[in-house]
Image (cartoon, rainbow, N blue to C red):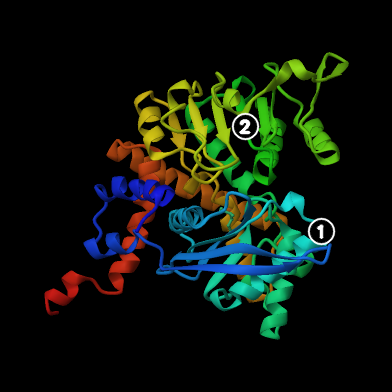
Amino acid sequence: MLTSTLCDANRRLTAALQYVKISADAAERLKAPKASLIVAIPVRMDDGSLRIFQGYRVRYDDTRGPTKGGIRFHPDVNLDQVQSLAFWMTFKCAALNLPLGGAKGGITVNPKELSRLELERLSRGYIDAIADFIGADVDIPAPDMYTNAMIMGWMVDQYSIIARRLSPAVITGKPLSLGGSQGRETATARGAFYVLEAMMARSGRLPQHTTVALQGFGNAGSMLARLLFEAGYRVVAVSDSQGGIFLPQGLDIPSIQAFKASSRSLKAVYCEGSVCHLSQAHALISNAELLSLEVDILIPAALENQITADNASQIKARHIFEVANGPITAAADAILDARGIQVFPDILVNAGGVTVSYFEWIQNRNGLYWSIEDVHRRLKTMMVTEADQIWQRAETLKISLRTAAYVHALERLGQALDAKGTREYYTNGI
Ligand code: GLU
């Protein structure tokens, strides 16, 4: 039985199916996850008590290779959400032509409420619980929301303890010292930046005449804000889960990053001539207000389901780049399309993270490590090549970039599924 977010995700599949010739078997296979694991993770808390956390790992489809996807630590994590995220990973890996399937994992927890030691015990406990479900040739986790390289380091260590051998390729997004890849930390932002720059080159717009509002100041959001700022874009608004700041003349992103790192809140210094001011309360806006700002580019880089049928008609941006997974619902897509707002879909825009994860996995298996320049060059080539092909499909078929991205991925998935044997093959008695 499909539940709500996964149902919504499946609507994108249905839309794409009209434009690609794959067997009915293959289409059917992609509608539900291959395996979903729910685990209870007992954790000894610092005060001596025992708490049980609920964890998940979903392997959606492994036709094109071992499944791949991050691990999220968030209070909203639930099975439906993890299954949807695993669905998106399947299409994301296929859209980028990575020889990987899709997966996702998560724990229902607010990590900000845990001590460092509790967080480590929870991370190791999660690996204890899912160790038989993952593996370098089976399913390869990575960071996602509120998880990072340090947590991946604990996890890969725990897996190696269980397996009684070093197994760096089982998890990506590790610290460099444990076999991580150069450039993994900034990969999602950088991948999105390459796609955005490709769009700008096509339109002939100049960065200094382009305003950007960005929702979410986590890993991907803050690093993308930095890249855009350095390239000369006018980033006028950013927000985190507490709220946002808005300055029409453009925010000084490096100072916001510094404030956020030291005080955990969003404040900015902006300069006029030689005078610099700390932005004050007058510039505060809510997350909802940020989404409806009149900007050239809106970048949701936080949670899923942010732009829905309820607020889609208030969006004033000309282009939306989905750095978050699933920030726009299928119902909102239709409204945005009708209003001529161009959406660059998540399965393309945020694929830089998993692409460099794939590079990390290759490096671990080869034992040969690449320079940062190599990582950037290969990432750019892959992002721009696939983005161009998706763009061309959208123009030829006169469909949205989202549907084109799904068509692009579905063709590859369909071919792989069909190559394993279809109903037509058996009934024709060849
Ligand atoms: N969590 C990231 C995503 O949603 C990266 C997954 C990975 O590197 O495997 O794409």
In the image, which disc is placed on residue 214? 2
Instruction: Give percent across and percent down for residue 36.
Output: 47, 67
Instruction: Name the one closer to the observer, 173 or 259.
Output: 259
**Residue 339's x, y, as percent?**
38, 23
Quarter of the render that holds ligand 1:
bottom right
Residue at 72%, 18% (x, y): give it.
283
Q: Mark 1 points at which residue?
A: 116
Compared with 192, 35 (above or below) is below
Question: Which quadrant is the C terminus positioned in?
Answer: bottom left
Identified by mark 1, the residue type is: Arg
The quarter of the rendered structure image containing the N terminus is bottom left
Q: Kindly identify the residue that appears in the image at 78 percent across and 32 percent down.
A: 256
| Residue type indicated by callout 2 | Leu
Q: Mark 2 falls on what kind of element?
A: strand
Instruction: Describe the element under mark 1 as helix, strand or loop.
Output: helix
Residue drawn at x 36%, y 46% is: 12
Q: Is residue 368 above or below residue 378?
A: below
**Left or right: where 204 falls relative to 334:** right
User: What whole-number distance in Å separates the C-alpha atoms at marks 1 and 2?
Assistant: 29 Å
Horizontal side of 404 relative to 430 (left or right) equals right
